[in-house]
Image (cartoon, helix red, strand yellow):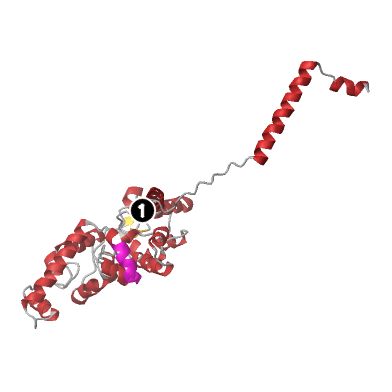
Amino acid sequence: MNIFKSHFWYNKSQRNGIFLLVLLIIVFQCIIVFVDFSSDKIIDTNSPQVLAFQHKIDSLQKVEIENRKPKIYPFNPNYITDFKGAQLGMSLDEIDRLLAFRKTNKFVNSKKEFQQITKVSDSLLHKISPYFKFPDWVIKRNKNKYSNQNAISSISPSLNKGSVEKSRKSKYKLSTTDINKATAEDFQSINGIGPAFSERIVKYRSKLQGFSFKDQLYEVWNLDKDVADSVLETFKIVEKPTIKTQNVNTVTFKELLKNPYIDYELCKKIFNYRDEVAELQHISELKNIKDFPLDKYDRIVLYLVAQ
């Protein structure tokens, strides 16, 4: 009993305080149980105030949904990635067709050409084509091409494209049929080759020190394959160019980078391999380099010798 007595022995003030606390607890419990706090007031959900408030909430929800959607900014369709294509709604096959086309070092220059390559539906093209952004020179070229087509069609209803092209060619006499000696004006005699492309062919030929393979013409940036085929029907490699070669064992890093088929990474690999073997005995040893682009070997060795 002495144990319990020490815990339950209170003076009069303490007992009154405990009694008041218990009483307050009981009163609050009774209020919660027996008092009805609900309101009998019926709110009219069709009232103008409620409808206006609901309309405002719906508007805010729509704005928030639109803000959460991925925004599409103007972009060049030639650089669409897998992720970007999926965002635009393109299928994997459509994306793969575009990527395969780009691996040939060619570019899409109009929304019509984009649809021909990717085979996207008309509805998807109509949705994403307003965001296509092509370089200014492409836009200018397309406008000129459209103007020329309109001009040709207005000359005579019976004058077809073939006769116009024949008339154009007959006005210019080629200075040569050797692709390595042809001038920019000679190239412009080919349908589809204007001043810009003719100068581009001449500049690339200078960079190569002359065309050694006819397929090198397809490497000219943005030159359409059909147009290149037309060029090769008229111009041939009559004389092989004389190319200045460099000794792969003594060439400097900067000089090796001037090779039109060697980029920075491949240049590093060649130098690392040269350090390992001390000296290349034959130029074919380049094939021993890991990940060496064998498809470019014949072109790369045009500019290199092992001495």
User: Is 15 or 180 nearer to us in this picture?
Assistant: 15
Between residue 183 and residue 300, name the one nearer to us. 183
Residue 287 falls in image quadrant: bottom left
- For residue 179, side relative to residue 58 (left or right): left
246 displayed left or right of 83 = left
Q: Is residue 128 magenta?
A: yes
Crowd band around label 1 with a 10 angstrom C-alpha radius: few (<14), some (14–19), many (20+): few
Query: Residue 116, percent across and down?
Result: 30, 72
Residue linked to disc 1: 71
Q: Magenta span covers which residues?
A: 117-129
Q: Nearer the viewer, residue 218 or 135?
A: 135
**Residue 262 lies within the magenta run:** no
In this orientation, does residue 73 appear? yes
Residue 57: where, in percent of width, then height? 41, 49
Q: In which quarter of the image is residue 72?
A: bottom left
- Secondary structure under badge 1? loop
Q: In the displayed structure, would residue 104 be above or below residue 233? A: above
Please report the residue visible at 41 percent of the width from the left and 54 percent of the height from the top.
Answer: 46
Q: Is residue 216 visible?
A: no
Instruction: Farthest residue to the front: give it.
Output: 40
160 or 297: which is nearer to us? 160
- Location of residue 224 in the rendering, given as x and y in whole percent from the top left corner: 25, 69
Rendered view: 272 above or below 114: above
**Which residue is found at the position 11% from the left and 79% from the top?**
166
